[in-house]
Amino acid sequence: MKKLLFLGIISLFILTGCFLPDGVERAEDFDQPDIKKEFCGVQLSFQYCKCAFHGQYCQDIGMSKKEAQKYVDEEYEKWLGTKREEFTKNCQAANGYFQDDKCNYCEQGLIAGETSCEQDSLGTDDQDGTEEELVNLPDGPYNEDCTINTEEYDRDWKKYSDIDNAIAPTDRSYEAQQALKAYESMIVKLTETFELQRDIEIEDQMQADLDEYRQAIVQNQKTNLLKAFWRLSWVTFTTIKSGTTAGKSFSNLLTSSGNAVQNIGSALKTFQATVPASSDLAIDKSTLLGKAEVAGAKTALEAVESLGDPGKVVARLIKTAGEASLPSANISEAEINVLKQQQIDKNVVNQVLANSRAANSERQSKITVLESEIKTLEGQIVEWENKEKQRVATALEESCLKLTNPEPVPPEDSDDVSQ
């Protein structure tokens, strides 16, 4: 009985607000959103969360489970920060102050300070006896008259904007949406440029190996011939499996070689099945674009930069080819003469080299066009971001003026009728 009485008294204290700070009419907790239910798959692509929490889709996003967990946690904290900031602003706009993850709404006649509800301060003009209410400015990059503080705003304006914000792209301002579209187009073109530069490097290396191969055939150097041939085969199969355009012109060489010498043809079929697709050559553009939407343009551009130097990527590929377990094929001098007749006398090697050089020339022309388009997109991004910056500045000033100079409430009509 005593226990029930005690609980009843405690409940009465809570209901009557005895545990609320002085001057606080009511309190509202900041309800922290659930990371799995309200963030994953809504604010962040589900693949990152699946990788972080279940070890799934990790290969699709190019991260380990630990890396994905770190990335998801960081992005969630950023998004949670924006939700908390939004809650705080709404709290302050409703005459409350935010403290200990809750909003304390002040009683009528009191105004919210930084950490408490305070008496409404009035300033008195000693000369004419008029009273002027002292108004607290809302949080933001403001001067005392609600104009934008240029220095502060130039530094922090993006955190007030829809750019690089963890909100759905369709909910962003028109200016921010256009900036995102330009960023996405630029990311695609930057990736295409990287792929073209990489393929030029691959073709250059294969041309050098083909020159060595041609010289070995002419000079009957069986060992050098086979080494060059298997390197060319390894890179050709790797690029084809990776879906790149590099090395396709060399497939004619492999076909004619296999048909010309039976031992090489048999080894070639076995070798082709053992060559893996190179992860260094596979680039998932959808993942890069997903980062632009979810994590912001800066993160997406950093992901493009992380693709690395095309020359170094190719160097790793060629190094792997050199370290691969290359097959052997017993060929006689007579069979070397067959290769010479099939590939040198009939200009197969020369034609492959010509096609490869023509392909590289075409790639270089595309790179020139892409570089010009990327420069144009960079200008568009600057233009749209400047428009978004101006839009946000105007909105901030208007919001400040409304909060500090509320419109007067018109008096109610009197029911009294003059006699």
Image: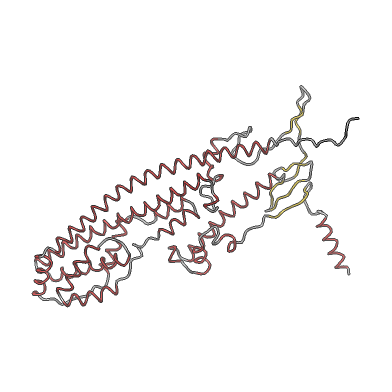
Q: In x, y percent, where is residue 40?
A: 55, 61
Structure colour scheme: secondary structure
Q: In x, y percent, where is residue 152?
A: 55, 38
Quadrant placement of the C terminus: top right
In the depicted structure, whether residue 348 falls above or below residue 197: below
Name of the residue lying farthest toward the right? 419
Side (left or right) of 16 relative to 355: right
In the depicted structure, whether residue 43 falls above or below residue 145: below
At x 27%, y 60%, the residue is 246
Side (left or right) of 23 relative to 103: right
Q: In x, y percent, where is residue 260?
A: 14, 73
Q: In x, y percent, where is residue 150?
A: 54, 35
Count of numbered tags: 0
Quadrant placement of the N terminus: bottom right
At x 18%, y 73%, the residue is 258
In the depicted structure, whether residue 228 falls above or below residue 187: below
Residue situated in front as seen by the camera: 114 or 37 = 37
Name of the residue lying farthest toward the top? 127
At x 15%, y 71%, the residue is 223
Side (left or right) of 125 relative to 2: left
Side (left or right) of 306 relative to 227: right
